[in-house]
Amino acid sequence: MREVFPVRRIEPLDEEIAEEWSRDIASGKDKSVHGVGAHRAGGIWRVTVWAMEFVREEPLESELREAIRDALERVPGASDVDEEDREVWVVGGSPSGEALVVAVAAVVDARAERIRLHIDSL
């Protein structure tokens, strides 16, 4: 059975952040595999995928990057999707933060077993 991690709106710690969404994950190990969050500042969404800090081997890395980008581009209202950093994607347009997190969470959850095996081998 696949574990379910709810997505919730959280109170931003930085006053420059207009809105923030994250998965509710208690365990550090689960956060490394399943962690996804998004925040909006200056009209731009930044979506963070925790696993991408650790996944640096092929073919898993490219597969995840492509699937994450595709998922973000399919979110209604999303435009101008691009990678900003190793584990951060920027998204323009008017998507909902919740929808961004849910879309990317489905990508990482579908590959969670492979991600976990990879992280455990580090």
Image: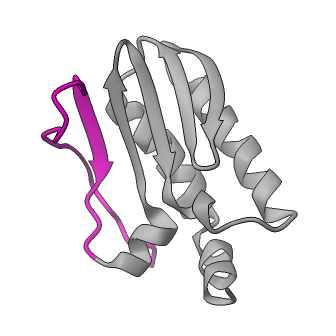
Farthest residue, direction right: 59
Q: Please tell me whether residue 65 is drawn above or below residue 90 in the rendered image.
A: below
Q: Nearer the viewer, residue 68 or 46?
A: 46
Q: Nearer the viewer, residue 9 or 39?
A: 39
The quadrant of the rendering that contains the N terminus is bottom left
Q: Quadrant of residue 46?
A: top left
Give the residues drawn in magenta, as a range.
1-26
Q: Please tell me whether residue 78 is drawn above or below residue 104 in the rendered image.
A: above
Q: Quadrant of residue 89?
A: top right
Residue 79 in the image, given as x and y percentages of width and height: 58, 13
Q: Please tell me whether residue 36 is drawn above or below residue 58 in the rendered image.
A: above
Residue 56 in the image, given as x and y percentages of width and height: 75, 65
Residue sitting at x 58%, y 31%? 72
Residue 6 in the image, given as x and y percentages of width and height: 27, 56
Residue 11 in the image, given as x and y percentages of width and height: 12, 40
Name the side, left or right, on which 116 lies relative to 41.
right
Colour convention: one colour
**Magenta stretch mostly in which secondary structure?**
loop
Residue sitting at x 29%, y 67%? 25
Residue sitting at x 48%, y 46%? 48
The quadrant of the rendering that contains the C terminus is bottom right
Residue sitting at x 58%, y 49%? 87
Name the side, left or right, on which 98 lies relative to 82.
left
